[in-house]
Amino acid sequence: MTRKRIQIKKIDNISSRQVTFSKRRKGLFKKAQELSTLCDADIALIVFSATSKLFEYASSSMHQVIERHDRYSAIHRLDRPSIELQIESDSNNILRKKVEDKTRELRQMNGEDLQGLTLQELQKLEEHLKRSLTNVSKDAKFMQEISTFKRKCLIMLPIQGVELMEENQRLKQVPSLIHAHSYRQSSESILSNSSNLPEDGGSNTSLKLGLP
């Protein structure tokens, strides 16, 4: 009859968990002792239970094993750089190579360090120079257009200012013109009414002046 395989997961029952911990801890320490005896290995085990109780086993001395571990870790860190330092070193090397390549390209564009270049590399350098000159010409033309536009704006601003002042002056004169027009219409109406009055000879109304 085959033994039922136990599923490795946390035991929910506290009593069963404590019993299993005790049995497995004793078995672990026994296996460590056998390994130390059979293979002449220096072994140290430190176990904390769920209740924070300490259990330990050492084939020689726990203190000596821990000191040996610390010395080995320190030497190991000095011999092999950490992953972060290695990544930083690789990044610095890549950046340094890029700077050297760009510096060499600039010197070659200035006509320096051309020795050893193949015909294909020289042709590639010539095409790069042509593209750079084209871009410079486009930028110069664009800057010239901007400068021309600025000058036109500076010329148009005073003219527009004068036009605005004239328009403002004209708007200020509008109320006066309206008042003069109304006054003229009123005067014409009075004169028109006066012309319709009868003459003095035909008037039946007389004005008498004197004391009563």
Image (tube, rainbow, N blue to C red):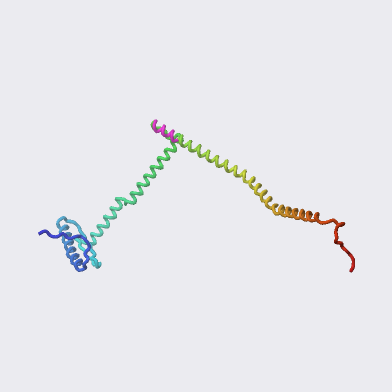
Residue 51 falls left or right of residue 204: left
Please state the extent of the stretch shown in magenta in the rendering.
119-128
Q: Position of residue 25 (x, y in %)?
A: 19, 63
In the rendered image, residue 85 lying in the magenta stretch gets the answer no
Residue 202 at what x, y percent from top left?
A: 86, 57
The residue drawn where x is 23% and y is 67% is 53
Q: Position of residue 125 (x, y in %)?
A: 42, 34
Closer-to-camera residue (189/70): 189
Total numbered badges shown on the rendered structure: 0
| Quadrant of the frame with the C terminus | bottom right
Q: Residue at x 55, y 42 (%)?
A: 146
Residue lying at the far top in this picture: please name it: 119
Q: State the residue in front, 86 or 203.
A: 203
Residue name at image x 73 percent, y 53 percent: 181
What residue appears at the point 41 percent right and 32 percent down from the top-left corner? 123
Tell which residue pokes out farthest to the left in this image: 1
Left or right of 29 on screen, residue 181: right
Tell me which corner region of the image, top left, top right, bottom left or bottom right, holds residue 58: bottom left
Where is residue 209, by image quadrant? bottom right
* Image position of 171 with respect to 124: above or below: below
Q: Is residue 113 left or right of residue 64?
A: right
Magenta stretch encompasses residue 120:
yes
Which quarter of the image is occupied by the N terminus?
bottom left
Q: Is residue 177 above or below residue 119?
A: below
Quadrant hosting residue 117: top left
Residue in front for this viewpoint, 69 or 31: 31
Q: Main secondary structure of the magenta part?
A: helix
